[in-house]
Amino acid sequence: MKKQRKHYRPEAKVAKGAVTTRQRKVHTQLGRAAVRIFAANDRVNQILIEHLDPAAWRAKPPGKVRTIAAIFTHMHNVRSKWVRLTAPHLKVPRQLNRAHCTPQQARAGLAESAARCAEMLAEALGGRGGRVEKFRRDGWARPWPVGLEMLCYMLSHEAHHRGQICMLAHQLGFPLPDDVAYGIWNWEKLWKECGWPRGPGYDSNNEPLVEPPR
């Protein structure tokens, strides 16, 4: 009977402790990066509200479409739900009333919910034994083990609604200035405005957040 060949696995020669240490380090780097990415993401929201024509805030689109005010309050309220379901030990931000919320209240609420989401991401992806082990995006949805999927889902939700907002502003006759429409893609500037002068990929000591492969 022919013997089966054993396939060479290079990882088998690496000490178990070394692998564990490396995984923990990568997880910590991922946690720091996730916090910065979500902060930059919220900076885009703040810029849009700051430069949006005040008349566009409650302008009613044709058909059964939410106003820009309602979309921004929805984004904040969904964040609050994520925190309440996923990290109830954190201070859950109060929900905003879309019928009465002002641009100033929306900016303050979004800043608070962004901070709570950043704390949640730091615990989930920080690799330090945090209390966040599952991401619960909704009460009816099956929880996910924490990972990059959690961050990607959160960012996708926000980007989807930002696209709606930019489109509605244009359709309602209140297009965003060109420097704003193009400026939200200037990630280097966004990172600087959030307090990280080297831009994406670097920590506060100007060191890369993730070490290059050796």
Image (cartoon, grey):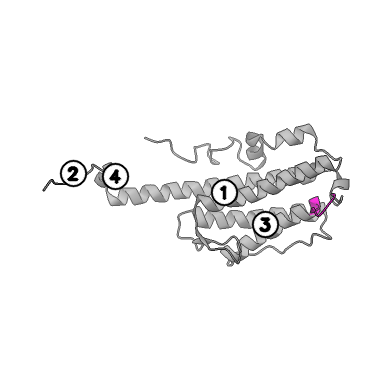
Give the side of residue 124 with respect to residue 178, left or right.
left
**Within-10-Å neighbours for mark 4: few <14, some 14–19, many 20+:** few
Q: Which residue is mark 3?
A: 113
Mark 3 vs mark 4, CA separation in Å: 41 Å
Q: Amino acid at mark 3?
A: Ser
Label for residue 11? Answer: 4
The image quarter in which residue 181 lies: top right
Q: What secondary structure is marked by label 2?
A: loop
- The magenta region covers 62-69
The secondary structure that most of the magenta stretch takes on is: loop
Q: Are marks 3 and 1 in contact (CB under 8 Å)?
A: no
**Within-10-Å neighbours for mark 3: few <14, some 14–19, many 20+:** many
The question of residue 67 being in magenta is answered with yes
Mark 2 vs mark 1, CA separation in Å: 40 Å
Residue 83: where, in percent of width, then height?
61, 62
Q: Are marks 1 and 4 in contact (CB under 8 Å)?
A: no
Residue 24: where, in percent of width, then height?
41, 51
- Which circle's residue, 1 or 4, is located before the other in the chain? 4
Q: Which residue is mark 1?
A: 152
- Which circle's residue, 3 or 2, is located before the other in the chain? 2
Q: What secondary structure is marked by label 1?
A: helix
Mark 3 vs mark 2, CA separation in Å: 55 Å
**Within-10-Å neighbours for mark 2: few <14, some 14–19, many 20+:** few
Please say if 60 is above or below 203: below
